Image (cartoon, helix red, strand yellow):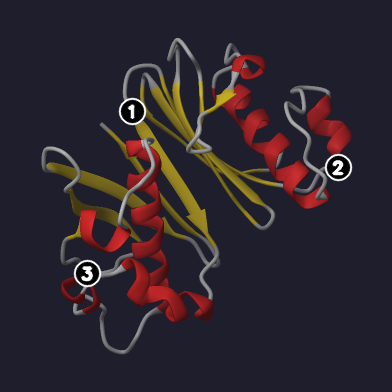
Amino acid sequence: MPIFFQRDIDENTKLAIWKIDEDESFFLNGVPLQREITHPKKRLQHLAGRFLLKTLFPGFPVELIKIADTKKPYLENEAYHFSISHCDEYAAAIVSKTERVGVDVEIPSVKIDRIKNKFLNEEELSILQSPFSINQLTLMWCCKEVVYKWWSYGSVDFSEKIRLQPFQLQPSGNLSAKFLLGNETDLILQYIIFDELCLAWLKT
């Protein structure tokens, strides 16, 4: 079982990353392919994410997952709150019985530098440490994705409505953010920087 990372956040909330080394048949023995996906890699990611949900909570009803107009997967009765992320050969999932959650996993790449002005405002750009850190920039993207998934209703201006507060990059830690859509909400995200992977998550 290629669990890359796992953490029981509390008695109701669990988080894990799966490194995908298996073929489709392995995952299809445990979970169904719920929609038509033609790209083999995306199909593997889809299956691995759902397999991970059942790994975290064996009673998770993956066959009842629906997809919202915002493309967020959800359970109609919210018996579990959950979030899934895929990146290359990794799938991450967070599941909670009681609280809204979000997760994102990314492989740091210099490509993130090309789009930083699209998701960061001027104050956030000034946070970037010198010398320039791809890991820090990737983490900031990760955290904004996490908040977007936690919000779950779509239509969020990443640069204006999700405001990351100043922080010093560590191998793992907390990061504060303000969500400005509707009532202003203060959020505390958690993160870990692995050798070639960035993970961030949130539960409220």
Height in image: 194 above or below 47? below
Name the image quarter holding the N terminus: top right
Disc number at residue 23? 2
Question: Which residue is located at x 50 percent, y 33 percent?
Answer: 69
Q: Nearer the viewer, mark 2 or mark 1?
A: 1
Q: Secondary structure at mark 1?
A: loop
Disc 2 crowd rating (10 Å Cα; few below 14, some 14-19, many 20+) is: few
Label 2 amino acid?
Asp
Q: Nearer the viewer, mark 3 or mark 2?
A: 2
Q: Read off the residue under disc 1.
A: 100
In whole angstroms, how far apart are the C-alphas of marks 1 and 3?
26 Å
Asked whether the residues under the numbered discs 1 and 3 touch, taking CB atoms below 8 Å apart as contact, a structural biologist would say no
Q: Position of residue 18 (x, y in %)?
A: 63, 43
Label 1 amino acid?
Arg
Of all residues, the one furthest to the bottom in this rendering is 131
In whole angstroms, how far apart are the C-alphas of marks 3 and 2?
40 Å
Label 3 amino acid?
Gln
Q: Is residue 23 left or right of residue 186?
A: right
Quarter of image, res 45: top right
